[in-house]
Amino acid sequence: MKQLILFGATLALFLFGGCSSEEKQTTSNSPSFDEVFLSRRSIRNYDASKKISEAEVRELLKATQEAPSWANQQPTKYYVAISPEKLTAVQDMVGANKERIANAPVLIVSTFERGKSGFFQGNQTNEIGDGWGAYDNGLSNCYLILKARAMGFDTLIMGMRDSDKLRQLFGIPENETVMAVIALGYRASEPNYPSKRDLDEIVTFF
Ligand SMILES: Cc1cc2nc3c(=O)[nH]c(=O)nc-3n(C[C@H](O)[C@H](O)[C@H](O)COP(=O)(O)O)c2cc1C
């Protein structure tokens, strides 16, 4: 009898308990896709009191591995400055960006391995060549900045950086091209929404 009651209780919990998909949706803390898109902005002022753990950075970078890449070559690599020494060093390698990212708790250097994306058996597939590696790197970094926002973080992609000094600091091999440095942290103030071109200026339908 005791067993029957226990079985009934378990069944009731399963049928009416917290495992319906409707309930899952309403209790989820994840922002919607549109919320992520619209609230993601380049942030140039970070909150010094808020830190980000290595585990959180790992979760973030794991998400970049879902990005598509040429023949799944996955040419993007990341070098993460999270220690005070490395953060200070990288801050001096981003030119006029230094002030903007002074309080960011993490700085991520992104590179891509040349000769992978855009190549087949060592031969360049078309006129873009290693441009496809840069393309894939941009895709990975796009996943990074959107996942970051979904996790409640903010980012600044920086094209203004000293690639030679970064290469030396992190021991980045010669077969990798250094692309952007990405600041990761929490916004200290709300950014302005930048103006965007008219859709018809960038789209042509035929
Ligand atoms: C490849 C690339 C390089 C960039 N380099 C810098 C930079 O060095 N410094 C900076 O403050 N912003 C930089 N940005 C941020 C852009 O200025 C920003 O994305 C643009 O103004 C649109 O603003 P939003 O990101 O808030 O939509 C860069 C963005 C990209 C994609």
Image (cartoon, rainbow, N blue to C red):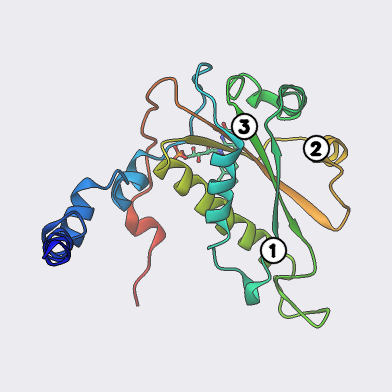
> What secondary structure is marked by label 3?
strand
Look at 73% across and 80% down and name the residue there. Answer: 125
For the residues labelled 3 and 2, say whether their Cβ atoms are less than 8 Å apart: no
Relative to 39, residue 60 above or below = below
**Identity of the amino acid at label 1?**
Gly
**Mark positioned earlier in the residue sequence (3 or 2):** 3
Question: Which mark's residue is nearer the viewer, 3 or 1?
Answer: 3
Percent x, y of residue 63: 52, 55
Percent x, y of residue 40: 40, 40
Look at 33% across and 43% down and name the residue there. Answer: 38
**Identity of the amino acid at label 2?**
Leu
State the separation of the CA atoms marked 3 and 1: 24 Å
- Viewer-closest of 163 and 170: 170
Residue denoted by label 3: 106
Look at 44% across and 20% down and name the residue there. Answer: 188
Figure quadrant of the N terminus: bottom left
Percent x, y of residue 159: 65, 40
- Viewer-closest of 21 and 204: 21
Residue denoted by label 2: 166
Asked whether, in this view, residue 41 is left or right of residue 33, the answer is right
Relative to 87, residue 163 above or below = below
Look at 85% across and 39% down and name the residue there. Answer: 164
